[in-house]
Image (tube, rainbow, N blue to C red):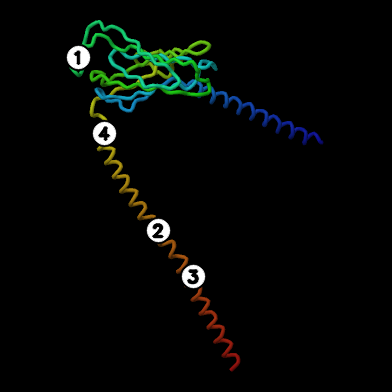
Amino acid sequence: MGSTGQNTYSGARSIVRGGTIALGAAALVVVGAVSAGAHVTISSDTDEAGAYALLTVSVPHGCDGSATTSVAIQIPEEITSVTPTRNALYEVEAVSEELDTPITDSHGNEVTERVAEIVYTTDSPLPDAERDAFELSLRLPEEAAGTTLYFPVVQTCEEGEAPWVEIPAEGQDGESLDHPAPSISIVEAGAVAEAEPEAAADTTVSQDASAGDQSSVSDATDESSQTPLVITSLVVGALGLLVGLVALVRGRKRS
Protein backbone atom coordinates (compact mmCIF):
# COMPACT_ATOMS: atom_id res chain seq x y z
CA MET A 1 0.00 0.00 0.00
CA GLY A 2 1.36 3.47 -0.97
CA SER A 3 1.95 6.28 1.48
CA THR A 4 -1.22 8.06 0.33
CA GLY A 5 -3.31 4.93 0.96
CA GLN A 6 -1.73 4.39 4.38
CA ASN A 7 -2.43 8.00 5.37
CA THR A 8 -6.06 7.65 4.26
CA TYR A 9 -6.44 4.37 6.18
CA SER A 10 -4.82 5.87 9.28
CA GLY A 11 -7.11 8.92 9.09
CA ALA A 12 -10.19 6.72 8.77
CA ARG A 13 -9.13 4.69 11.83
CA SER A 14 -8.68 7.89 13.83
CA ILE A 15 -12.15 9.11 12.85
CA VAL A 16 -13.75 5.77 13.77
CA ARG A 17 -11.85 5.65 17.08
CA GLY A 18 -12.87 9.21 17.91
CA GLY A 19 -16.50 8.49 17.04
CA THR A 20 -16.47 5.38 19.25
CA ILE A 21 -15.10 7.34 22.19
CA ALA A 22 -17.71 10.06 21.70
CA LEU A 23 -20.53 7.51 21.57
CA GLY A 24 -19.22 5.84 24.72
CA ALA A 25 -19.10 9.15 26.56
CA ALA A 26 -22.63 9.97 25.42
CA ALA A 27 -23.85 6.58 26.64
CA LEU A 28 -22.30 7.19 30.07
CA VAL A 29 -24.02 10.57 30.28
CA VAL A 30 -27.39 9.00 29.41
CA VAL A 31 -26.94 6.19 31.94
CA GLY A 32 -25.95 8.72 34.60
CA ALA A 33 -29.01 10.83 33.86
CA VAL A 34 -31.30 7.80 34.11
CA SER A 35 -29.72 6.71 37.40
CA ALA A 36 -29.98 10.21 38.83
CA GLY A 37 -33.67 10.38 37.91
CA ALA A 38 -34.57 6.99 39.40
CA HIS A 39 -35.83 8.37 42.72
CA VAL A 40 -38.53 7.04 45.01
CA THR A 41 -41.62 9.01 43.95
CA ILE A 42 -45.23 9.53 45.02
CA SER A 43 -48.33 10.13 42.89
CA SER A 44 -51.96 10.82 43.73
CA ASP A 45 -55.29 10.28 41.97
CA THR A 46 -56.26 13.78 43.12
CA ASP A 47 -54.41 16.82 44.43
CA GLU A 48 -57.42 18.86 45.62
CA ALA A 49 -57.43 20.11 49.19
CA GLY A 50 -60.02 18.35 51.35
CA ALA A 51 -60.39 15.43 48.92
CA TYR A 52 -59.91 11.76 49.75
CA ALA A 53 -56.87 10.58 47.82
CA LEU A 54 -55.12 7.34 46.94
CA LEU A 55 -51.36 7.87 47.02
CA THR A 56 -48.91 5.51 45.33
CA VAL A 57 -45.31 5.38 46.54
CA SER A 58 -43.06 3.86 43.86
CA VAL A 59 -39.70 2.23 44.64
CA PRO A 60 -37.81 1.72 41.34
CA HIS A 61 -34.61 0.00 42.55
CA GLY A 62 -32.54 -1.15 45.53
CA CYS A 63 -29.65 0.48 47.39
CA ASP A 64 -26.62 0.50 45.08
CA GLY A 65 -27.50 -2.98 43.83
CA SER A 66 -28.72 -4.36 47.15
CA ALA A 67 -32.27 -5.75 47.48
CA THR A 68 -34.90 -3.79 49.45
CA THR A 69 -36.18 -5.23 52.75
CA SER A 70 -38.34 -2.40 54.10
CA VAL A 71 -39.90 0.91 53.09
CA ALA A 72 -40.82 3.41 55.82
CA ILE A 73 -43.09 6.26 54.68
CA GLN A 74 -43.29 9.30 56.96
CA ILE A 75 -46.66 11.09 57.02
CA PRO A 76 -46.83 14.93 57.08
CA GLU A 77 -48.00 16.47 60.36
CA GLU A 78 -51.05 17.98 58.63
CA ILE A 79 -52.44 14.45 58.07
CA THR A 80 -53.83 12.57 61.08
CA SER A 81 -55.32 9.41 59.58
CA VAL A 82 -53.94 6.99 56.96
CA THR A 83 -55.12 3.60 55.71
CA PRO A 84 -52.36 1.52 54.10
CA THR A 85 -53.17 -0.95 51.31
CA ARG A 86 -52.16 -4.58 51.84
CA ASN A 87 -49.20 -5.90 49.87
CA ALA A 88 -49.01 -9.69 49.69
CA LEU A 89 -45.20 -9.78 50.06
CA TYR A 90 -44.98 -7.33 52.97
CA GLU A 91 -46.09 -6.90 56.55
CA VAL A 92 -47.42 -3.43 57.20
CA GLU A 93 -47.28 -1.43 60.44
CA ALA A 94 -48.87 1.92 61.24
CA VAL A 95 -46.74 3.83 63.74
CA SER A 96 -48.74 6.36 65.80
CA GLU A 97 -47.72 9.35 67.88
CA GLU A 98 -49.56 11.48 70.45
CA LEU A 99 -50.82 14.87 69.35
CA ASP A 100 -49.66 17.87 71.33
CA THR A 101 -53.20 19.21 71.17
CA PRO A 102 -56.23 16.95 70.59
CA ILE A 103 -58.34 17.79 67.54
CA THR A 104 -61.85 17.02 66.35
CA ASP A 105 -62.20 15.03 63.14
CA SER A 106 -64.84 15.45 60.41
CA HIS A 107 -67.18 13.08 62.30
CA GLY A 108 -67.04 15.09 65.51
CA ASN A 109 -64.74 12.64 67.31
CA GLU A 110 -61.85 13.80 69.47
CA VAL A 111 -58.51 12.64 68.07
CA THR A 112 -55.54 12.41 70.45
CA GLU A 113 -53.02 10.67 68.22
CA ARG A 114 -52.16 10.40 64.55
CA VAL A 115 -50.44 7.96 62.17
CA ALA A 116 -46.92 9.32 61.80
CA GLU A 117 -45.37 6.54 59.71
CA ILE A 118 -46.30 3.50 57.62
CA VAL A 119 -43.68 0.76 57.45
CA TYR A 120 -43.70 -2.07 54.92
CA THR A 121 -41.31 -4.96 55.77
CA THR A 122 -40.63 -8.15 53.81
CA ASP A 123 -38.81 -11.47 54.26
CA SER A 124 -38.62 -11.74 50.47
CA PRO A 125 -36.36 -8.81 49.54
CA LEU A 126 -37.23 -6.79 46.44
CA PRO A 127 -34.43 -7.34 43.86
CA ASP A 128 -32.52 -4.27 42.72
CA ALA A 129 -33.67 -4.79 39.11
CA GLU A 130 -37.37 -4.85 40.05
CA ARG A 131 -39.81 -2.21 41.30
CA ASP A 132 -42.74 -2.17 43.70
CA ALA A 133 -45.49 0.25 44.70
CA PHE A 134 -47.27 0.93 47.99
CA GLU A 135 -50.69 2.59 48.26
CA LEU A 136 -52.04 4.81 51.02
CA SER A 137 -55.59 6.09 51.41
CA LEU A 138 -56.01 9.41 53.20
CA ARG A 139 -57.74 12.78 53.20
CA LEU A 140 -55.75 15.75 51.98
CA PRO A 141 -55.94 18.65 54.47
CA GLU A 142 -58.23 21.53 53.46
CA GLU A 143 -55.76 24.06 54.81
CA ALA A 144 -52.93 22.63 52.63
CA ALA A 145 -54.16 24.30 49.41
CA GLY A 146 -51.32 26.04 47.61
CA THR A 147 -48.62 24.12 49.49
CA THR A 148 -46.48 21.05 48.89
CA LEU A 149 -46.73 18.02 51.18
CA TYR A 150 -43.57 15.96 51.63
CA PHE A 151 -43.54 12.24 52.45
CA PRO A 152 -39.94 11.34 53.40
CA VAL A 153 -39.14 7.68 52.74
CA VAL A 154 -36.38 5.56 54.25
CA GLN A 155 -35.60 2.58 52.02
CA THR A 156 -33.70 -0.14 53.91
CA CYS A 157 -31.83 -2.83 51.99
CA GLU A 158 -29.89 -6.01 52.77
CA GLU A 159 -26.80 -3.83 52.61
CA GLY A 160 -27.21 -0.17 53.49
CA GLU A 161 -30.16 2.16 53.05
CA ALA A 162 -31.36 5.04 50.89
CA PRO A 163 -32.88 7.95 52.89
CA TRP A 164 -35.19 9.82 50.51
CA VAL A 165 -35.72 12.58 53.06
CA GLU A 166 -34.17 15.76 51.64
CA ILE A 167 -36.59 18.71 51.43
CA PRO A 168 -35.53 21.63 49.20
CA ALA A 169 -35.00 25.04 50.74
CA GLU A 170 -37.19 27.91 49.57
CA GLY A 171 -36.36 28.63 45.93
CA GLN A 172 -34.20 25.52 45.57
CA ASP A 173 -34.83 23.04 42.77
CA GLY A 174 -35.74 19.65 44.26
CA GLU A 175 -34.17 17.88 41.28
CA SER A 176 -30.77 19.13 42.41
CA LEU A 177 -30.98 17.03 45.59
CA ASP A 178 -29.38 13.58 45.76
CA HIS A 179 -32.19 12.00 47.78
CA PRO A 180 -35.29 14.25 47.48
CA ALA A 181 -38.32 13.39 49.60
CA PRO A 182 -41.37 12.36 47.51
CA SER A 183 -43.98 15.12 47.41
CA ILE A 184 -47.32 16.26 45.96
CA SER A 185 -48.54 19.81 45.37
CA ILE A 186 -52.02 20.59 46.68
CA VAL A 187 -54.46 22.84 44.80
CA GLU A 188 -57.66 24.62 45.87
CA ALA A 189 -60.81 22.50 45.97
CA GLY A 190 -62.68 22.80 42.68
CA ALA A 191 -59.63 24.07 40.78
CA VAL A 192 -59.60 21.00 38.54
CA ALA A 193 -63.36 21.19 37.87
CA GLU A 194 -63.06 24.87 36.86
CA ALA A 195 -60.27 24.04 34.44
CA GLU A 196 -62.24 21.23 32.78
CA PRO A 197 -64.78 23.45 30.90
CA GLU A 198 -61.91 25.45 29.39
CA ALA A 199 -60.22 22.21 28.37
CA ALA A 200 -63.50 20.98 26.90
CA ALA A 201 -63.91 24.23 24.93
CA ASP A 202 -60.37 23.94 23.60
CA THR A 203 -61.12 20.35 22.61
CA THR A 204 -64.31 21.40 20.78
CA VAL A 205 -62.48 24.12 18.86
CA SER A 206 -59.73 21.65 18.03
CA GLN A 207 -62.26 19.09 16.85
CA ASP A 208 -64.05 21.69 14.69
CA ALA A 209 -60.75 22.77 13.19
CA SER A 210 -59.83 19.15 12.64
CA ALA A 211 -63.17 18.51 10.96
CA GLY A 212 -62.57 21.50 8.70
CA ASP A 213 -59.10 20.25 7.85
CA GLN A 214 -60.48 16.79 7.12
CA SER A 215 -63.18 18.32 4.89
CA SER A 216 -60.52 20.26 2.97
CA VAL A 217 -58.41 17.14 2.65
CA SER A 218 -61.46 15.21 1.46
CA ASP A 219 -62.24 17.85 -1.18
CA ALA A 220 -58.63 17.90 -2.29
CA THR A 221 -58.64 14.10 -2.44
CA ASP A 222 -61.80 14.09 -4.58
CA GLU A 223 -60.26 16.62 -6.94
CA SER A 224 -56.99 14.73 -7.13
CA SER A 225 -58.84 11.45 -7.76
CA GLN A 226 -60.76 13.07 -10.63
CA THR A 227 -57.66 14.57 -12.24
CA PRO A 228 -56.28 11.27 -13.68
CA LEU A 229 -59.72 10.51 -15.18
CA VAL A 230 -59.84 13.89 -16.94
CA ILE A 231 -56.31 13.51 -18.27
CA THR A 232 -57.04 10.00 -19.51
CA SER A 233 -60.16 11.21 -21.30
CA LEU A 234 -58.22 13.99 -23.02
CA VAL A 235 -55.45 11.60 -24.08
CA VAL A 236 -57.94 9.10 -25.48
CA GLY A 237 -59.77 11.88 -27.33
CA ALA A 238 -56.51 13.21 -28.79
CA LEU A 239 -55.49 9.72 -29.95
CA GLY A 240 -58.92 9.26 -31.58
CA LEU A 241 -58.56 12.56 -33.39
CA LEU A 242 -55.05 11.64 -34.55
CA VAL A 243 -56.22 8.27 -35.89
CA GLY A 244 -59.06 10.00 -37.75
CA LEU A 245 -56.69 12.49 -39.38
CA VAL A 246 -54.30 9.72 -40.45
CA ALA A 247 -57.17 7.77 -42.03
CA LEU A 248 -58.37 10.91 -43.82
CA VAL A 249 -54.90 11.62 -45.26
CA ARG A 250 -54.48 8.02 -46.44
CA GLY A 251 -57.91 8.12 -48.09
CA ARG A 252 -57.03 11.26 -50.03
CA LYS A 253 -53.72 9.75 -51.25
CA ARG A 254 -55.48 6.67 -52.56
CA SER A 255 -58.01 8.71 -54.41
> Could you tell which of marks 2 and 3 lies nearer the N-terminus?
2
Q: Position of residue 17 (x, y in %)?
A: 67, 28
Q: Residues within 10 Å of mark 3 (few under 14, many from 20)?
A: few
Task: Give left or right: position of 94 versus 12.
Answer: left
* Secondary structure at numbered mark 4: helix
- In the image, which is nearer the foreground, mark 2 or mark 4? 4
Residue carrying label 2: 220
- Dot 1 amino acid type: Asn
In the rendered view, tell whether residue 49 sits above or below residue 152: below
Position of the C terminus by quadrant: bottom right
**Viewer-closest of 39 and 6:** 39
Looking at this view, is 13 or 27 the one in front?
27
Q: Quadrant of residue 132?
A: top left
Say what secondary structure mark 1 lies in: loop
Disc 3 is placed on an element classified as: helix
What crowding class fits label 4: few (fewer than 14 Cα within 10 Å), some (14-19), or many (20 or more)? few
How would you rate the neighbour count of disc 1 (Cα within 10 Å): few for under 14, some for 14-19, many for 20 or more?
few
Label whose residue precedes the other's in the sequence (1 or 3) = 1
Task: Give coordinates of residue 60: x percent, y percent.
Answer: 47, 22
N-terminal label among 4 and 1: 1
Q: Earlier in the sequence, mark 2 or mark 4?
A: 4
Asked if labels 1 and 4 touch by Cβ distance under 8 angstroms, the answer is no
Specify the quadrant of the image occupied by residue 41.
top left
Q: Which mark is residue 109?
A: 1
Mark 4 vs mark 1, CA separation in Å = 35 Å
- According to the picture, the residue beneath numbered tag 4 turns out to be 195
